[in-house]
Amino acid sequence: MRKGWMFIMCGFVGLLALTVLASEKPPSDFASAMQAIAGAQAAAATATAAEDYDAIEKHAATIVDSFLVIEKYWSARSPEVLPMVRTAAKAASDLRVSSQQRSLEGVAYSAKELTAACANCHTAHRETMPDGTFQIK
Ligand code: HEC
């Protein structure tokens, strides 16, 4: 009985180790695209507070472009993640359209969708390492 538990425990530990091993350091273009996305998202929020639609549009375009790098990465590595990338990219492109339409409501809505898309993917595919850096899982 005891031995059985030991085996199960070892199995769990082994699985955990595998999960950690399966995560990998992001290529530099991936990490810099994420940073560009985060910077543009923050800038778009500031522009939204100022109702500066041209600036929102510009930052949304940066996000859309940067997601192309992310999309390329996942199509080569794990195409099953692509729907998550596309949900995020779609929210960014909706943000762009809403800013062109000068719709504050549309901007607020797509910004919220975008934030949710970031969080969904980070929960599923971003691993925080003990030193505070991130890896891809
Ligand atoms: C399809 C998955 C996915 C989506 C969508 C996504 N991210 Fe990420 N993000 C990751 C992964 C995986 C990492 C870890 C690798 C890394 O740090 O580059 C990461 C890392 C980051 C980092 C840290 C970059 C660094 O310096 O290492 C930031 C900042 C970031 N994401 C911001 C965002 C924001 C803001 C959004 C939404 C607008 C977003 N991400 C959407 C997967 C995603």
Image: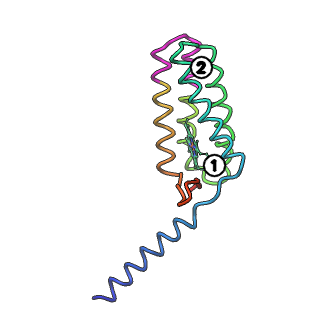
Residue furthest right in the image? 29
Up-down relation of residue 2 to residue 18 (above or below): below
For disc 1, does the CB lie below 8 Å from ligand 1? yes
For disc 2, does the CB lie below 8 Å from ligand 1? no
The quarter of the displayed image where residue 60 is located: top right
Q: Which residue is mark 1?
A: 74
Amino acid under disc 1: Trp
Residue 14 placement (x, y as % from top left): 48, 75
Residue furthest left in the image? 1
Overall secondary structure of the magenta section: helix
Q: Which residue is mark 2?
A: 56
Q: Is residue 31 magenta?
A: no
Image quarter of the C terminus: bottom right
| Residue bounds of the magenta highlight | 93-109
Question: Which residue is found at the position 53% from the left and 60% from the top?
Answer: 130
Image quarter of the N terminus: bottom left
Residue 68 placement (x, y as % from top left): 67, 37
Q: Is residue 98 magenta?
A: yes
Q: Which residue is more in the foreground, 100 or 47?
A: 47
Element at badge 2?
A: helix
- Mark 2 or mark 1, earlier in chain: 2
Residue furthest front in the image? 131
Please tell me whether mark 2 or mark 1 is closer to you in this view.
2
Residue 131 placement (x, y as % from top left): 56, 58
Question: Ligand 1 falls in which quarter?
Answer: top right
